[in-house]
Image (cartoon, rainbow, N blue to C red):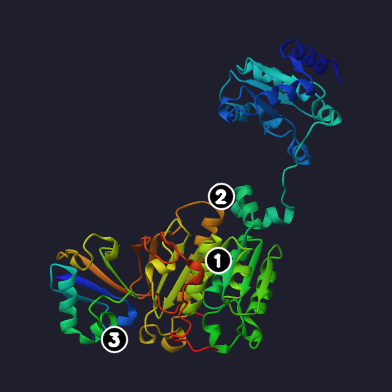
Amino acid sequence: MATVRLAPVLRASAGGSKQVSAEGSTLAEVLNDLYRRFPALKEQIQPEDQLSRYINIYVNDQDVRFLQGGLETSVGPNDTVILLPAMAGGLL
Amino acid sequence: MGEASREIMRQARKQVPEWTPAQVRESLSQQQDAAPDDREIVLVDVREKIEWNEGHIPGAIHVPRGYLELQIEEAVPDKSKTVVLYCAGGVRSLMAGATLKQMGYDNAISMSGGFGQWKASGFPFVQPRTMTEAQAKRYSRHLLVPEVGEQGQFKLLDSKVLLLGAGGLGSPAAYYLAAAGVGTIGIIDDDVVEESNLQRQIIHNTKRVGQYKAESARETIEALNPDVKVITYIERLDETNVARIIADYDVIIDGTDNFPTRYLLNDAAIIANKPVVHGSVFRFEGQLTVFKPHEGPCYRCLYPEPPPPALAPSCAEAGVLGVLPGIIGLLQATETIKLLLGIGDPLIGRLMTYDALAGEFSELRLFRDPNCPACGEHAHPEDLPTYADVCAVPAR
């Protein structure tokens, strides 16, 4: 079970949790497991087939877009996946 | 001069050869194309600091006669070099030469006539930059830190930092940049101070409610540090003014609250080659990073598109712990100072995150996107969309 950390704006879709566990050995599987349990999350970050371009995903603090696998990146039981939408409108 | 001192001078003249200023100048010019370490001749000024400050020979190093024995071996480790010493008139330098000979420097020379003769011959000299006494007191704790010192403090005094927004992030940043002696601080903000700001925008206060934030910030900064010149821009950044405004600054601190401005700033900063210190906050969490054009990723590398409004609430809608922008703003000021001084490792390609409730700092690695439309291979930052029509924050 990998650990998935959610940026603040996503937590409401996951019952308010900052961190959840998810099953899967690749990133795609982990996300599917999340979406199955939290459909609102899918609506927020991957309503289409492709991952939305305003979401960044990090596996063990590395951006998956630049890791070889993209969505096929392997995710092990001790790995942490972070979902981070574009930095929220900042602050005045 | 008494008899004993005359004897000292006689002895010194026997041991230490003298060169005229013309001879010194000729020898120095012969070696000026060589690398510093390959130069055979080292020029040492043995006068007091106050004399050195009034003018000295270009290329000379300063080892006052009072510290000669203690400092010369570190200043000139290679005792085989030709060490040309000079003072004001040629007397102290002879005595210094005798001391150097005693210490094992075989090629110590004294310049006859000293700096006085050098100037009278019309040869060039330089005056170092000095700080006022008030500045030396104010910045004394900076002067004591090796990574800053006098040179670093001058760099800060010569620097220009632009703050986008004098609000939650801009307030603390402005305070500490002013305290540090950043010579010019630009503030662009067309908003006025409201009570609800005072929970976090500490550069303002109750008396300033209703005033333009940029003006209020200026008042606070001027009271803290009169060395700082504050330039205010009571306007919003847009396509018509961004290039003109950012051109004058060395570093830009992004404390804005909306996506269009972030994209606009990003593109303009890439075109003008200006680093942007980016910060953002939400409730109890904050993030910051440094976007340095062509060295690390830019904002569009990370986020080619903004999120839909539902995913990007502003602080007015979502609320924020007042002290949190304080922390992130201070970190932005810290990164700015590191960039200005060229010290440490700025957060280029690194996103620092802070979770106040957990008490945790963490870091994510960011990468440049080779296909980024703003800074990638076929970049065209001049005509990219800023998504002004799709954002959560209503126009004020």
Residues at discs 2 and 1 in contact (Cβ within 8 Å): no
How far apart are the two marked residues, 1 and 3, measured between alpha carbons?
Answer: 34 Å
For the residues labelled 3 and 2, say whether their Cβ atoms are less than 8 Å apart. no
Q: Position of residue B71 (x, y in %)?
A: 61, 30
Lower sequence index among marks 2 and 1: 2
State which mark lies toward you, 2 or 1.
Answer: 1
| Coordinates of residue B337 in the picture (x, y in percent) | 54, 59
Residue type, label 2: Val
Q: Amino acid at mark 1?
A: Ile
Residue B266 locus on image (x, y percent): 49, 68
Query: What crowding class fits label 3: few (fewer than 14 Cα within 10 Å), some (14-19), or many (20 or more)?
Result: some
**In the displayed structure, does residue A32 sit left or right of residue A91?**
left
Can you name the residue that lies furthest to the top here?
A: B14
Which residue sits at x=16%, y=84%?
Answer: A37
Q: Which residue is mark 2?
A: B145
The chain under label 2 reads B
Q: Nearer the viewer, residue B175 or A72?
A: A72
Which residue does the image show at 37% across and 84% down from the upper left?
Answer: B308
Image mark for residue B252: 1
User: Between residues B212 and B106, which one lies in front from this camera angle?
Assistant: B212
Q: Mark 3 — residue?
A: A12
Secondary structure beneath label 1: strand
Q: Position of residue A17 (x, y in %)?
A: 25, 81
- Helix, strand or loop status at disc 3: helix
Which numbered disc covers residue B336?
none
Name the side, left or right, on which A51 lies relative to A88: left
